[in-house]
Amino acid sequence: MSERVRVDEVLTSLLDLCRPLEPFDMPLLDAHDATLAEDIYAGERLVMKAGSRIRSTQIGLAASIGLDHLPTRPHPRVVVISAGPDLVEPGIPLKADEEYETNSWLLTTAVREVGAVAYRVHSIPDDESQLQSVIEDQLVRADLIIISGERHDDSFDLITRTLEKIGEIKTVEISIESSGRHNFGTIGPDKTPVVTLPGDPIAAYISFELLIRPMIRTMLGTANIHRPSVKAKLEKALTSSGGYRSYVRAILSEDGKSVAPLSSQDEQ
């Protein structure tokens, strides 16, 4: 049984499951593109702020004040799994009622763009025993596990039953228009966080941006876990279902003052 909840309520629960990873010192060149774990001072002057991404300029600055190491947080390790009997790897001809497995490719690269290490599981388990075996094999290298199923969420119950065998799982329906059911909780001996996203790729990506990205940013110890937002005037009116939040694909004007929703939300 799933309950209907707001996005912010789910995010609060998810952030309670994750915490910044333990910091460690890295040699300067190895620290490039990592997240700074502590404020850095030159004397009494703050020169680098904790939670910032270490770029080439920060490496140069560290060297200029005599540092050969920097305190960093490791990149979270995120395992991405897709499950469902009708999912087929790209490059293989489709049979009746089959669909190409899309989400793991989308989510794996999205995870990397946030700054985490992503592992895509190449097998596509289609029953509970196979899925449980795959998940348990991945626990050793996972700080977070993301699972999605088929486009119409036909495999959601399969995923839910499997997760309930190996952890504490909650099922919710988030108040997002055109979304689907989600699972979240912890599994395995180390209580590894796990989240199940909708099977539809667009719905999965919206949930990734709203939920998974802030989780990864929290593990990285970054100062801001959300993307920056802008306010702009709609070029035409929109309607949405009562009690649900709508996320609409649109184009922002060059001056950033107005936004035009796509005429069809199925456009690529």
Image: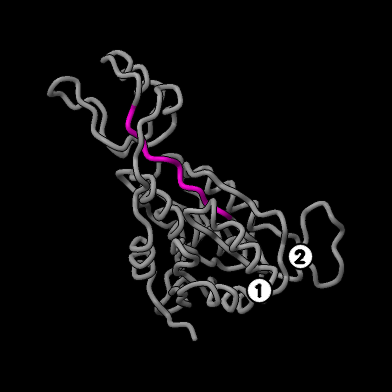
Q: Write down the quadrant of residue 148 in the picture.
A: bottom right
What is the x, y in percent for residue 23? 34, 40
Q: Which residue is mark 1?
A: 152
Segment tinted magenta in the rendering: 70-79
Q: Secondary structure at mark 1?
A: loop
Q: Which residue is mark 2?
A: 99
Decide: is 157 above or below 121.
Answer: below
Left or right position of 184 against 71: right
At a point 73% along the width and 70% down the height, the residue shown is: 126
Q: Residue furthest front?
A: 189
What is the x, y in percent for residue 180? 54, 73
Decide: is 1 above or below 153.
Answer: below
Q: Is residue 229 visible?
A: no
Q: Write down the quadrant of residue 158 in the picture.
A: bottom right
At a point 31% along the width and 39% down the height, the residue shown is: 51
- Mark 2 or mark 1, which is nearer the start of the sequence? 2
Q: Is residue 42 visible?
A: yes
Mark 1 neighbour class, 10 Å CA radius: few under 14, some 14 to 19, many 20 or more: few
Going by the numbered disc 2, the residue's amino acid type is: Glu
Q: Which mark is residue 116?
A: none
Judged by its main secondary structure, the magenta piece is strand
At a point 50% along the width and 65% down the height, the residue shown is: 188
Q: Secondary structure at mark 2?
A: strand
